Amino acid sequence: MRAHRRRHIAAPGLGLLALLLCGCSKNDAATGAPAIGLEPPGTALYQENCSACHDAENLELAKKPPKLTGLFQKPTLPSGAPATDDQVKKTILDGRGIMPPFRQTLDDEQVNELLKYLHTR
Ligand code: HEC
């Protein structure tokens, strides 16, 4: 149970979340979000770049990627580093352990969008 859902659910995301929770149909175009409709912004970026590791159950990795839900609701990240936007941004850009760096893959805007998305998980 998450005690307090952190603010910063992007306003459109909130409406979408409500829709999700009430199981309404998937074709609300109110936010004009591209193709993926209901998903908060950053979802596609997350799914393309992060999900394969972070939502995997059976990766044969020496170190399991931690789940990224409620990432900002604790004071520290799984590594013990402070759970701040800056720290997570650094992790994304520079990589960590066997996690690859995304500096060449994602631009600043995309990283910021991902951060916003991670706040909604
Ligand atoms: C190749 C698999 C892989 C991919 C792809 C990947 N990660 Fe990771 N990630 C890991 C692993 C493994 C760790 C644990 C690293 C460690 O602590 O040694 C990790 C750790 C993290 C952490 C915790 C850092 C900490 O300080 O505890 C965050 C946040 C994170 N990843 C975010 C992301 C985001 C956002 C993306 C997409 C842009 C992403 N990761 C893509 C494997 C991956």
Image: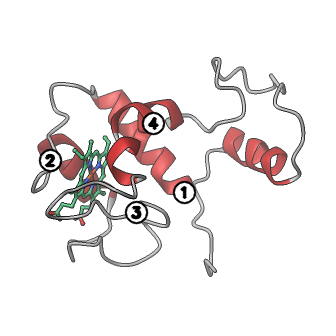
Mark 4 or 2, nearer chain start: 4
| Disc number lying in front (3 or 1) | 3
Given the image, on which type of amino acid does mark 2 rest? Gly
Q: CA distance from mark 2 to mark 3?
A: 16 Å
Q: Is mark 4 within 8 Å of ligand 1?
A: no
Crowd tier of the residue under label 4, counting other residues whose Cα lies within 10 Å: few below 14, some 14–19, many 20 or above: few
Which residue lies at the image location 12% right of the left edge and 44% below the top edge? Answer: 94
Beta carbon at label 2 within 8 Å of ligand 1: yes
The residues bearing labels 2 and 1 have C-alpha atoms spaced at a distance of 20 Å
Q: Earlier in the sequence, mark 1 or mark 4?
A: 4
Which type of secondary structure does the marked residue at label 1 adopt?
A: loop
* Residue 63 position in % (x across, y down): 18, 64
Residue at which label 4 appears: 47
Q: Is disc 3 in contact with disc 1, using a CB cutoff of under 8 Å?
A: no
First-in-chain label (4 vs 3): 4
- To which quarter of the image does residue 62 belong? bottom left
Reading the image, the residue beneath label 2 is: 95
In the picture, the disc for residue 67 is 3
Instruction: Look at discs 2 and 3 and give the one toward the viewer.
Output: 3
The kind of residue tagged 3 is Lys
Q: Secondary structure under badge 3?
A: loop
Residue 28 place in picture, x, y as percent: 84, 27
Of the numbered discs 2 and 1, the one sitting upstream in the chain is: 2
**Residue type at mark 4?**
Gln
